[in-house]
Image: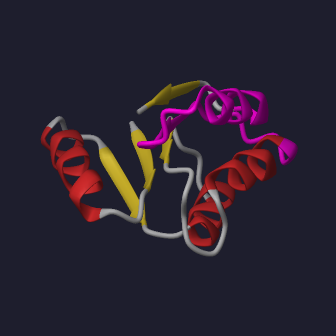
Amino acid sequence: MRILIVEDDEFISEPIIKALREQHYTVDVTEDGQTGWELASAFTYNLIVLDIMLPKLDGISLIRQARSQNILSPIILLTSQESSTNKVIGLDAGADDWSG
């Protein structure tokens, strides 16, 4: 299983990456949305874990681009934003789930 993590906060991403790799998942990691988009469009991922607030390209825009290009990998938004408005925007953009 190949997973893409797009998160600019190492405090959040490192434990997730470590846990996934210990379970023998292949994990690609980037800290900005533009590189996340480039990876998502170049490779097939079984899962994309994505922050909303990212440098270069925000997570919502990345989701919209992915869905418009028919990238159907499941996407989980990972964010500390608790706003129900942000949750609705993310899910409407094409995210499959939300974790805050």
Let me know if residue 72 is in the magenta part. yes
Residue drawn at x 73%, y 42% as measured from the top left:
71
Residue drawn at x 62%, y 53% as measured from the top left:
59
- When the figure is inspected, residue 58 is found, relative to residue 94, above or below; the finding is below
Quadrant housing residue 24: top left
Q: Bounds of the magenta span?
A: 68-94
Quadrant housing residue 42: bottom right
Quadrant housing residue 88: top right
Residue 51 left/right relative to 65: left
Residue farthest to the bottom, as pictured: 56
Residue 87 left/right relative to 13: right
Q: Position of residue 47 (x, y in %)?
A: 49, 36
- When the figure is inspected, residue 78 is found, relative to residue 65, above or below; the finding is above
Q: Nearer the viewer, residue 97 or 45?
A: 97
Q: Position of residue 9 (x, y in %)?
A: 33, 63
Q: The C terminus appears in which quarter of the rendering?
A: top left
Q: Position of residue 66 (x, y in %)?
A: 75, 48
Q: Position of residue 34 (x, y in %)?
A: 64, 70
Let me know if residue 41 is in the magenta part. no
- When the figure is inspected, residue 41 is found, relative to residue 80, above or below; the finding is below
Residue drawn at x 64%, y 67% as measured from the top left:
38
Residue drawn at x 59%, y 55% as measured from the top left:
43
Residue 11 left/right relative to 92: left
